[in-house]
Image (tube, grey):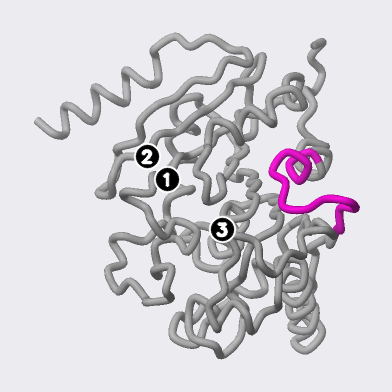
Amino acid sequence: MKSFLTVFLTFFLLFTPYGLGNEVKSITFASWSKPDVELFYVLPKEINKDTKVLFIIHGNSRGAERYLKLWISSSKNKNVILVAPHFSKKYFPSYSKLNMASASGKVNTNQDDWLTGSIASFYSFFKNKFQLDSNTYLMYGFSGGSQFIHRYLMYGKDKAIEKAAIGSAGWYTFISFQPFPYGIKNMPLEPGRIEWLMSREVLFLLGDEDNDPKHSGLNRSNGAMNQGLHRYERGYNYFKSLVRIGERFEVPFRWRYKVVSGVDHDTKQMSEAAMSFILEDLDYKNIDH
């Protein structure tokens, strides 16, 4: 019965008509053993073999649909599907740590809870639903979403991230001998992972006014405070640590560092600063739009 249901649902998803445009739609992703995740998405004018998928990861406000809407205007003539997963606080309290550790830093030993395969699963769903050719996807994250993405680059089960932009994380998992989630001492990376993540096209964004050491959302644990007094300092120190790793081990480092002038912890302005980088190669090819 379960096999029949799976086949039926797959057929239904593949052949149900869908309208294209800038309307925000949503589906409930339930094709795994974890709690359901609502996926908000916007389709482009036309879907073809070159269509890409951009995953927009929300911050701790968990306003997935709000984050998604910030990208609609700039992407309306681009060949990209926008997708914003909503990781509910009830079921995914530590989503920014990929559910691998709690906010206090306690490691979650139950790997079935981890979100290390989440984006790969979501991408597989959209790839099958819209019969996409691409084997890679794009990502953008601000604040808690930035935390999610840089850890997914480290621990994700797939290596399908083609390009990512991350901005204003509150703190980081350094490639250091500190215990996870502040370092990788008790959570080692798989062989070759460091070389792979450093070779990705990543735009690393910081607002030069995101420097409030008393910001209400700032992690003030010992592990986080060791990284710097505020988001700007922590981000600078994190990026600098990756530069040093690249130099020490002669690993090509392709990330770009960008300071956004006059911006503090602002979702809209940081999203706008990332758009040209993420969307630059997503024009329709040989199609009059």
Decide whether residue 152 is among the magenta residues.
no
- Which residue appears farthest toward the right when viewing the image? 261
On residue 37, the disc is 2
Residue drawn at (62%, 52%) of the image:
161
Instruction: Give the foreground label among 2 and 3.
Output: 2
Of 239 and 9, nearer the camera is 239
The answer to whether 56 is drawn above or below residue 200 in the figure is above
The residue pinned by badge 3 equals 159
Could you tell whether 170 is left or right of 64 in the image? right
Residue type, label 2: Val
Label 3 secondary element: loop
Residue type, label 3: Lys
Residue 266 percent coordinates (x, y): 72, 46
Does residue 242 appear in this view?
yes
Question: Mark 2 and mark 3: span between their CA atoms?
Answer: 22 Å
Quadrant occupied by the N terminus: top left
N-terminal of the pair, mark 1 or mark 2, is 2
Label 1 secondary element: loop
On residue 121, the disc is none
Question: Mark 1 and mark 2: span between their CA atoms?
Answer: 6 Å
Q: Which residues are magenta?
A: 258-272
Residue type, label 1: Phe
